[in-house]
Image (cartoon, rainbow, N blue to C red):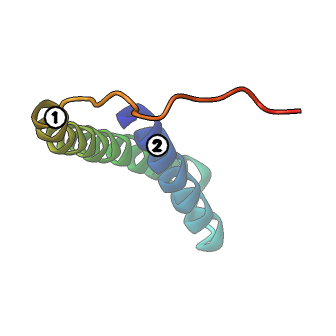
Amino acid sequence: MAHEYAVRLALVAFATAAIQGLLTRSAFEPALKLALGASAGFYLLGWLCGEMARRIVEESVQPLASSQPLESPTITPQAPRR
């Protein structure tokens, strides 16, 4: 989950920085460096946020799973009638 979130965030950052470079009519090389730097920075930020979210969800689900035993269904499924 962390990797997918990080990739999406990095692509959004790259596109935003590239469009900003085009709109401000910056030179190609500085605009590309800025876009790549933003992409790398936001990839790291997205990975950290995604990893944190995964751990929070796992920790919140773990106590519920260990405290409540799985119950078997009391109703047995029946075959469809014709």
> Residue 38 placed where, x, y %?
40, 50
| Type of the residue with mark 2 | Leu
Secondary structure beneath disc 2?
Answer: helix
- Residue 35 appears anywhere in the view: yes
Depth check, front residue: 64 or 48 = 64
Q: Residue at x 78, y 31 (%)?
A: 80
- Which three-letter amino acid code belongs to the residue tagged 1? Gln
Q: How many marks?
A: 2
Image coordinates for residue 19, horizontal then vertical, percent: 62, 63
Estimate how packed mark 2 is, as few (under 14), some (14 to 19) or many (20 or more) residues with alpha carbons within 10 Å. Answer: some
Q: Residues within 10 Å of mark 1 (few under 14, many from 20)?
A: few
Q: Which mark is residue 62?
A: 1
Res. 33 visible in picture: no
Asked whether, in this view, residue 67 is left or right of residue 73, the answer is: left
Report the residue marked by disc 2. Answer: 36
Q: Hey, which residue is sitting farthest right in the picture?
A: 82
The x, y position of residue 10, in whole percent, is 46, 46
Q: Picture coordinates of residue 32 (x, y %)? A: 54, 47
At a point 34% along the width and 27% down the height, the residue shown is 72
The image quadrant that residue 78 belongs to is top right
Alpha-carbon distance for marks 2 and 1? Answer: 39 Å
Question: Residue 5 has which mark?
Answer: none
Q: Where is residue 57, by image quadrant? A: top left
Q: Is residue 11 above or below residue 1?
A: below
Q: Earlier in the sequence, mark 2 or mark 1?
A: 2
Instruction: Quarter of the image for the N terminus: give it.
Output: top left
The residue at the point 54 percent across, 62 percent down is: 16
In the displayed structure, would residue 80 be above or below residue 21? above
Residue toward you, 18 or 12: 12
Q: Nearer the viewer, residue 43 or 4?
A: 4
Question: Which one is closest to the eye, mark 2 or mark 1?
Answer: 1
